[in-house]
Image (cartoon, rainbow, N blue to C red):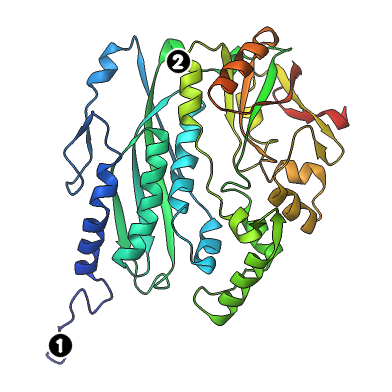
Amino acid sequence: MSENTKHVTYEDAGVDTAEGGRAVDAIKQMVAETNRPEVIGGIGGFGGLFSAAALKGMEDPILISGTDGVGTKLVLAQILDRHETVGQDLVAMCVNDILASGAEPLFFLDYIAIGHIEAEHMAKIVRGVADGCKLAGCALVGGEMAEHPGVMRPDDYDLAGFAVGVVDRPKMLDPANVRPGDVILGLPSTGVHSNGYSLVRKVIGVDGVVPGTPEAAAKKAELEAIEVADGVSLADALLAPTRIYVKPILDLLRGGAPVHALAHITGGGITENLNRALADDVDAVVTRNGAEMGWDVPPVITYISNQAELAPNEACKTFNMGVGLCIICAPEDEAAVTAALEELGEHPFRVGTCVPGTGKVVYSDEQ
């Protein structure tokens, strides 16, 4: 090193370790609120500790893991300066996926990359993660806050998450159990959830808008002024958090409901997710009459689809169309499964039926 080289600290390089410490302190109570009896210790160690003793009571415990992010919905959250709910999106994308096998989520870890750490900002994001974990019944056992000065804008951030769950092999759901004649039920989504936002951003004109600028403030006011439903702005509808289906579905399965398979409707919409819950010799026929689905589609999805002039097939492989989760059961069990879901406070509806085929999703208006 040259004698003329200036002494440079980590803080000089843009990493504020003191603020990082304050951020950890700010979230400790939130993390503790998600604890399950199996959690050992708290955050701050090199790894999250979780007892596997409960698995000993299972015949053949199968661990199931899932990882995901929130995607470009975060761009909208930054422009609107609303960060309290995207953490729930993160948890939902992971736990709903492992739920599709009938698994109970046990614990969750998050990874937050951000241009500059501010304890208050981080607390808002992690509050959403903690709320999501409580809704899913899983423990937030650890995570990472990574400050990326010079790589990301100070207010820019990205989220990733990782969930681990367990299911007893004899109770695991398997698409191979799906048969022709089976009925497909749906549980409603809360809107767009966390998929299709690259298209959403293009439609609402936020590409290239930098958060914290006058242009962002103007766009925020515009999105808050557009009403897509009674008293619901486009901004509110687009940031509605992804629904977590874990507790009602686990209650349904533990009650002995004869469910054959589940499908979490995420990126790729109905077309490219429902097929993942089908046997190789079965097709799903989804009820659709032209552009109209056989159930109520959230107004925000209709608004974006119309603004983008999406053909019905494009809409159905981009958005969830109001179906967050599909439940497949035998026709003779439809009434019982429906009644059990309603008893749990749910509002199931018929999505379609299964017919002989090759494992794909088709629509009734195309037959």
Q: Which amino acid does label 2 sit on?
A: Arg
| Residue under the image location 58 percent in, 46 percent down | 193
- Pick whichever of labels 2 and 1 is earlier in the sequence: 1
Q: What residue type is labelled 1?
A: Ser
| Residue under the image location 29 percent in, 53 percent down | 144
Depth check: give the residue in front, 212 or 296. Answer: 296
Q: Quadrant of the C terminus?
A: top right
Depth check: give the residue in front, 356 or 341. Answer: 341
- Secondary structure of the residue carrying tag 1 is loop
Label ID, residue 2: 1
Against 291, residue 248 (above or below) is: above
Please say whether residue 172 is visible from this viewpoint.
Answer: no
Please say whether residue 70 is visible from this viewpoint.
Answer: yes
| Residue under the image location 70 percent in, 16 percent down | 281
| Residue under the image location 79 percent in, 41 percent down | 313
Distance between the alpha carbons at the discs numbered 2 and 1: 69 Å
Left or right of 181: which side holds 94?
left
Q: Give the percent coordinates (x, y) of residue 249.
A: 51, 24
Q: How many numbered discs, if any?
A: 2
Q: Residue furthest bottom?
A: 4
Residue that label 2 marks: 254
Contact (CB < 8 A) between labels 2 and 1? no
- Image quadrant in which you'd find residue 41: top left
